[in-house]
């Protein structure tokens, strides 16, 4: 259920980590390059970087080797429109 204690605790932890990361970036000399790829209907194992045996994704592999690779991610919805809205607004898709 949205708003459960565990969900709220995890969200608080994520926000704390984000704020600590942002404060470290403010004091760094270089500004970061951040690229967020948000793909519809893409499973975890669909990319070569995650071990797909026949899919060839050399550009994504290069980006992954030069940057960060995240192995866990939660989306607000299994379909694109609500999950994109949640990403842009930071709110659940059922909120008005």
Image (tube, helix red, strand yellow):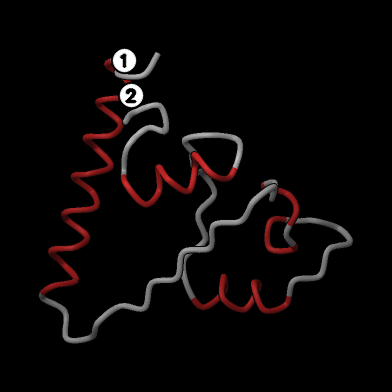
Residue found at the very far bottom of the displayed protein: 29
Count the marks: 2
Residue located at (69% from left, 47% from top): 41
Establish if 54 lies above or below 85: below
Establish if 19 lies above or below 93: below
Residue 7: mark? 2
| Residue 37 horizontal/vertical position (percent) | 53, 63
Per the image, label 1 sits on a secondary structure element best described as loop
Give residue 49's quadrant in the image: bottom right
Residue located at (17% from left, 53% from top): 19
| Residue 86 horizontal/vertical position (percent) | 40, 42
* Disc 1 from disc 2: Cα separation: 5 Å
| Residue 26 horizontal/vertical position (percent) | 13, 73
| Residue 54 horizontal/vertical position (percent) | 89, 61
Establish if 83 lies above or below 2: below
Per the image, label 2 sits on a secondary structure element best described as helix
Q: Is residue 63 left or right of residue 29?
A: right
Q: Which residue is mark 1?
A: 4
Residue 24: mark? none
- Marks 1 and 2 close (CB-CB < 8 Å): yes
Quarter containing the C terminus:
top left
């Amino acid at each position: 259920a949205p708003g459960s204690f565990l969900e709220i605790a995890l969200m608080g932890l994520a926000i704390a980590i984000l704020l600590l990361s942002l404060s470290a970036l403010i004091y760094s000399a270089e500004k970061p390059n951040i690229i967020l790829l948000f793909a519809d209907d893409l499973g975890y194992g669909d990319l070569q970087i995650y071990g797909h045996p026949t899919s060839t994704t050399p550009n994504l592999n290069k980006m992954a080797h030069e940057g960060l690779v995240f192995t866990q991610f939660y989306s607000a919805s299994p379909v694109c429109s609500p999950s994109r809205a949640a990403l842009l607004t930071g709110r659940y898709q059922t909120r008005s």
